[in-house]
Image: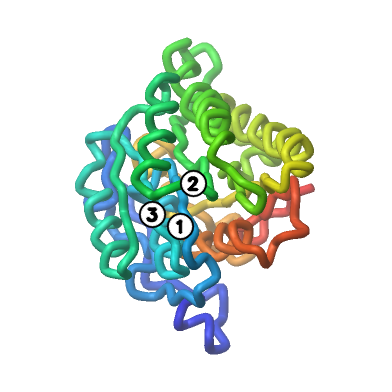
Amino acid sequence: MTDDQLALTDPTKRFSHITPQRQQQSVPGQDARLNPSPDHGEESYRGTERLTGRKALITGGDSGIGAAVAIAFAREGADVALNYLPSEQVDADHVADIVRAEGRIAELIPGDIRERDFCAELVSQAAEALGGLDIVVNNAGHQIFTEDLEDLDDEQFDRTMKTNLYAMHWITRAALPHLQPGSTVINTTSVQAYKPSPILVDYATTKAGINGFTKGLAMQLAPRGIRVNAVAPGPIWTVLQVTDGQPQDKIEHFGENTALGRMGQPVELAPAYVFLASPESSYVVGETLNVNGGLPTP
């Protein structure tokens, strides 16, 4: 729980000092260059020992939602292994420094999860470094807007599918031998699964697929005592938006279509992942928690 959550806070005014600005970065981008900087909970998230002794693998753990989850998990008592692309090293080092300052292990494992063999190596290295594995957060994602289907080439479609869906399958499958009863798998889907944007056809397709994957796998693994759930973010201020995740003319108004009238910050997602990872959610299976500022979903 963050400090300002302890007091009565108007959610429409929270983070009003962080306003989106037009800017362009090449894929995958760096949080360190994002202006203004997102709030990952570096100074604000306060843990309550809900994940003491747990061991988590987080993909896309260098920035955005993944970084916020890593920081929150560490402050709740968990050790973490973070996956990211090699070009994102500066962001990964920043998150690792915060995790280690909490006295927790931060294992950094760069690599491309579009490669099946690497996904297996990733899980093996994470489990070895942490002395086991009982939380898997499939969070990494690829999003590039395309105005017309004719311009959505096979290379982009393939990259989106492999990053967002194939890797989730490969990593979860490789992790299963390590997961004991009480373990959890948490997948990052999106409001795009329910309200697909016409310029994000491939991305929205993968997010709808993640919902199906989550619910089906949850039913399969529940008898083993392994819970599978998902979190569906809305418009969150991350580097994903400025690496052609959104058109430049939409950046300055990003999130204004929500009921709260603003974009969200990565730290606002972290409590949902903590809840789904902790025993507090022991009766929650196959659920998708929507954290989207008030965008109606089924």
> Which numbered disc covers residue 86?
none
> Which numbered disc covers residue 67?
3
User: Residue 140, relative to residue 145: is it above or below?
Assistant: below
Q: Residue 78 is drawn in which quadrant?
A: bottom left
Residue 56 can be seen, yes or no: yes
Q: Are marks 3 and 1 in contact (CB under 8 Å)?
A: yes
> Which numbered disc covers residue 69?
1
> Which numbered disc covers residue 133?
2
Report whether 194 appears left or right of 189: right
Name the amino acid type tagged 1. Answer: Val
Report whether 206 appears left or right of 253: right
**Residue occupying image coordinates x 72% and y 39%:** 221
- Circle 2 SS class: loop
Label 3 and label 1: CA atoms lie apart by 5 Å
**Residue occupying image coordinates x 38% and y 57%:** 20
Name the amino acid type tagged 2. Answer: Leu
Residue 156, horizontal then vertical, whole percent: 44, 18
